[in-house]
Amino acid sequence: MQAPGFGGTMRRNKAYAVSPPWATSTDFEMNKFKRPLANSLDRQEQATPDLMKYVNDNVIGRDKIIIGPYGPREVTYCDYVASGRSLKFIEDYIREEVLPLYGNTHTSTSAVSLQTSAFREQARKIIHNAVHAGPDDVVIFSGNGCTGALTTLIDAMTFTKPPVIFVGPFEHHSNLLPWRELMPKVVRIEESSKGTLDLKQLDNQLKTWQGRGHPMIGAFSAGSNITGIMTDTSRVSTLLHRYGALAIFDYAATAPYVDIDMNPPADRLTSSGEEENLAYKDAIVLSPHKLVGGPGTPGVLIAKKHLFTSTVPQPCGGGTVFFVSKHNQVYLKDVVERWEGGTPNIVGCVRAGLAFQLKQAIGASNIVRREDELVRRAFSAWSQCPNLILVGSHRAKRVPIFSFLIRHAQSGLLLHHNYVCTLLNDVFGIQARGGCACAGPYGQDLLGISDEMMRKFESLLLGRKPDVDSSGTKVADPTSREILKPGFARLNLVYFADEPCIQFVLRAIAMVAEHGWKLLPQYTFKRETAEWKHRSHHKQRPSRRGKRLGLDSVSYTSGQMTYTSVSSIPEKMPPANYQECLKMAEEVFESAEVKDKELEELGIELHDNPFEFDEDGAKFRWFLLPSEARRYLQQPELQQGPPKPLPFKVKTYEDGTTPNSQKARLHRRNTAQSSDSEAKPENGRIARPRVVPTGGRQRRVVSKRGDPQSTAVIRVRLPKVNNGSLVSMQQEEKAEAV
């Protein structure tokens, strides 16, 4: 049943009839496709471990070497949230089977066009089945990622009255800005106290708007690209449909890792005993480039056919029309053909189908099982790091996407997120990402930045009022204060990564959390762009600082293509394995003080004095400067000072797990105590270990009995990997107690 207000003429002139999405396909052909898929799923349990290893071994660039300030490092890619990586076997298939028979799809008179069209329609069917779409659902390849897919959906719908849009707390800009710019009313549903979508608030808002006669649309992220926290899409869909609202979901962040179901089975019975199935989705948008094997793919929209009520497709042009005369045009009736105007990204569509086919072969249940394990292990390992702040609830259901801050315990300031990511790259070869992850409102919530404080940051960052263009839209250029924009570092642990890689990443983050600040004097930053670079970057020869590849090196003067490659053998060999890389990282951190003294002896001054920021900039600065890090390295007594308050406070949740706030406060309090202080039992309870600095290299720990006389002096060492297994700080302390 169509909800009130939908399918009208607010934006277009008239409605139209639609035909099935597979107008040229028979039921036999659809069933023939499904059978092999079902058979392969039956064998998932025994095939998955080998298949995951096969995927990991075939990632293009997994053994790529980058040259950094601390020598060559092998790339460890942890940025799958932003984009997946290509796979050798998928690219081999495209090169050997698809491209030799490539032709434009907009004809049926040549062999290559017929074969290319067949490849593309098979890819469409693979995705159709992978998301459990039904006969009333269509799969449309559209534009760039979810942004292009959602724009197509908005263009396709018409309304008799202006609609009201309900969005959630996790929304990526691609599922927020199109609604804001095109729709008059957007209602944001906040987080619950447990860090998930507040269904009670959504229910109340739906009740409020139900009787006002406006069409209602719920557009929610299936999962956050910042924290990985997931939305219960079936419960949300059911709630929306009970009020006559549409249910639309953005699967950009979670599509590679979860089962997507457009039409879940009935979840309850009505009073008459009939099934009530309101959990179906009206539309979903996907970014297949985020799947492993998916780079170079278009956005994908899967939607119910009744939503396509606009009579004029966008874009309108080649491939969308049945007939065009000098004065008139008649558009095709088929939804897919009408809404895929122009020559499509044909090879990208085929690649999207292959990426989803691979995901189905591995099995969503196997992926979820592995990812749940990675989430548990990450929280367990990183809970030992008092300076590491993992944003978002730790108990909400999530995929292993982690955004974090690192606090400098003595000053109370944070390490700049771009510095943290640069350090992960330079010291470990780990590819991570810093910023707000294109989800600004959620990032604002997680960092505890109030609306008033956000307005102050906006004014500070812009430096002046933003310009307004001819359409009335605010526009601005970056200013010299970009460095002050708050954010966090983000990475994810991907399900097919091997065990040594997972151990390596967990340990690397712990090492940076504890010792990353020590390398700050070796780095400089640009206030205009918030980029951080090692000081040697500007002095080394291009070949030694990792020159970027460039198309301008391509030449045809010899009669064939030639180009300069920077992938030649490095002057130094990279670490032989992850453990050796961790050992080299230890040496880098341990030599930080010596390196800083060398810089000082060379007369290299750190031109980042806090007074270089104006009064407002100094007030809102939340990160540690290289000059301040130098003073902490050279004058340990500065560690006794009180921590500087930040202009924002990271949000905590009802479960008390976020961030490592209690441990961070305990750590800061204890580092301010004198080395001969004694810890005593609190309220008669067993005292927890008290960490006290003694000469910067040892710490005193009270026994579990709380006996001040029974103390052990522990020699502090950098985190270790022992025989491929994590060694917790408690295990290390126990082993080293003397």
Image (cartoon, helix red, strand yellow):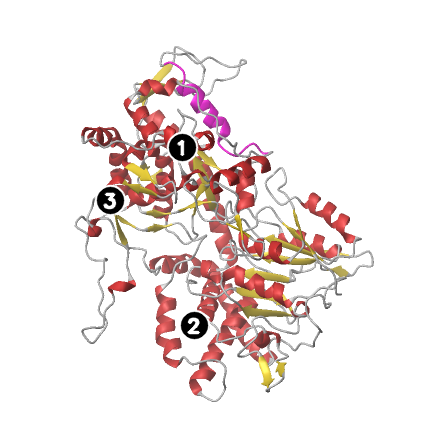
- Name, please, the residue furthest toward the bottom: 109
Q: What kind of residue is marked 3?
A: His
Vertical comparison of 210 with 619: above or below? below
Residue designated by label 2: 347
Residue range corresponding to the magenta coloring: 655-674
Disc 3 on helix, strand or loop?
A: helix
Sequence-first tag of 2 and 1: 2
- Between circles 2 and 3, the one closer to the viewer is 3
Q: What kind of residue is marked 2?
A: Val
Q: CA distance from mark 3 to mark 1?
A: 24 Å
Q: Is residue 182 magenta?
A: no
- Between circles 3 and 1, the one closer to the viewer is 1
Image side of residue 426 versus residue 192, left or right: left
Q: What kind of residue is marked 1?
A: Phe
Residue designated by label 3: 538
- Residue 274 percent coordinates (x, y): 78, 61
Mark 2 residue crowding within 10 angstroms, few (<14) / some (14–19) / many (20+)? many
